[in-house]
Image: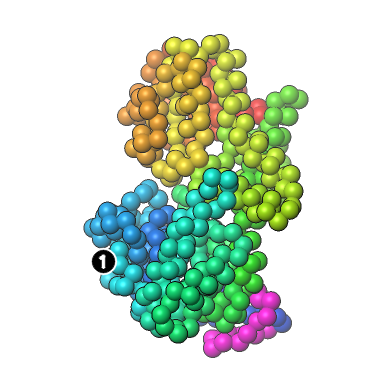
Amino acid sequence: MCGRQNHTAVSQTPLQPAGWELAAGVVRITVAYCPDGNGTIGGGALSRIAVIGTGYVGLTTAACFADLGNEVVGVDIDLDAVATLQRGEVTFFEPGLQEVVTRNLGSGRLRFTSSYEDAVPTAEFVFLAVGTPMGATGEADLTQVREAAAMIAIHLAEPSVVVNKSTVPIGTGDIVSNIIGTTSATDVNVHVVSNPEFLREGTAIHDFMAPDRVVLGAHDHAAAVRVGELYKALEVPVLITTLYSAEMIKYASNAFLATKVSFINEVARICEKVGADIKVVAEGMGLDHRICGEYLSAGLGYGGSCLPKDVQALVHISQLIGAHPQLLHAVMDINRSQPLLLIDKLHDAIGTLDQKTIAMLGLSFKPNTDDMREAPSLGLIKSLQRMGAQVRAYDPAAMETAGRRVSGVHMAGDAFEAVEGADALIVVTEWSEFRQLDLERVKGLMRRPVIIDGRNIYDPAEVRAMGFIYHGVGR
């Protein structure tokens, strides 16, 4: 059965294109849709889309737009990555993504190529989803963005909208527009729209298909509206604003989330001194709708591909314009020092770490991903090894990735192998399987029954009653 959905787009200067109803300064979209029998929403091909970059954001974007019925081509200059994707194999771990890619490759709605010439000339929308890694002084490195923009310009053959999904400094949309304007050999009309992504690793498919909002920014309002139409099969608020505001929304959002993490870790340090339990404190705070409980989990701090580099990039931007981002500096300082607290707890529990065996459960920066970028485990491993400790580790998904980043670590086949003969166990990543671990068996395998719970996944009273020496964070 088909259903009708209402979609709200908040706009500074709302227009009234076909299919949109204008009411009190708010653009509302009403569409009818139903699955086409193949698991997709929409029925047929709606738009021709090229997605430049098949990393985490690009592949998720390409696969999900194909699942909405569009014809999508993923483009990457990495020939090995393209060949792997053409075989239907996803190049990183993300729950549900393999199934979406497989389904849409089979339907013909999704394909992959290394050729801009193959993908760009017929595309109505070209999404930029290339990397913007941290540069030497904390700035976002736009090398890949610039190169991709130049290649797009060379191969444009019809009016298109270039949509930037990469996280970029304010004003990058103008840079992309200028590159296209000066590089293109034709007079093809091209508009640039900022459409920042808010995907979380481990829940990316859900986040794309059921987002809190879609943010669009452009100098040309009608171009932003056209991009908004791509999301019309989703029941989602669409905010249409200026190009610069859209680019800033991404940085401000991630900086605020990082601030919540560092704030709750700062409060956790206080809780340990005054005898309060940070788990209960955070729960009491989170029940206030003004605060919300998400990102209020005390532990080892934030990591991954977004929060660390985006906070640093916003600091860099602030310094360039003469602002003084004191709060952001404090957020980063707290996050850098947080894993070191666990080393102190280890010393308190077992004394010197020289010649001690430390088991680590979890390596990735969060569960349900194999991403090791800025993972707290990396710094912990280096600190432990410098102090003479032997490290044994287990992670359900990230051991292969971690093995390329660290050396001298025994990668165990499961959690029980990791803890065998260990003088202490550190919980680094809150994978679900660790919550349900047979702790009696763990205790029997360890040389000393010491748990340093870096994610507060266990109940202190219960674990201590089993005979463990237990240290959490802020408890």
Whether residue 220 is situated above or below residue 58 in the rendered picture: below
Q: Residue at x 50, y 40 (%)?
A: 374
Q: Position of residue 325 (x, y in %)?
A: 72, 48
**153 or 333: which is nearer to us?**
153
**Is 16 contained in the magenta span?**
yes
**219 or 360: which is nearer to us?**
219
Q: Number of numbered discs present?
A: 1
Whether residue 393 is situated above or below residue 31 in the rendered picture: above
Q: Position of residue 186 (x, y in %)?
A: 42, 83
Confirm whether residue 45 shows in the render.
no
Q: In the image, is 273 to the left or to the right of 388?
A: right
Q: Quadrant of the C terminus?
A: top right
The crowding category of the residue bearing disc 1, from other C-alpha atoms within 10 Å (few below 14, some 14 to 19, many at least 20), is: few
Q: Position of residue 429 (x, y in %)?
A: 49, 35
Task: Write down the residue under mark 1.
Answer: 106
**Is 419 contained in the magenta span?**
no
Q: In the image, is 256 to the left or to the right of 128?
A: right
Q: Which residues are magenta?
A: 9-23
Q: Residue at x 54, y 67 (%)?
A: 175
Q: Quadrant of the N terminus?
A: bottom left
Whether residue 195 is situated above or below residue 91 in the rendered picture: below
Q: Residue at x 61, y 25 (%)?
A: 341
Q: Residue at x 68, y 84 (%)?
A: 23
Q: Position of residue 312 (x, y in %)?
A: 61, 47
**230 or 38: which is nearer to us?**
230
Q: In the image, is 53 to the left or to the right of 82?
A: right
Q: In the image, is 43 to the left or to the right of 375?
A: left
Three-letter code for the amino acid on which mark 1 is drawn: Gly
Q: Quick one: SS at disc 1?
A: helix
Confirm whether residue 363 shows in the render.
yes
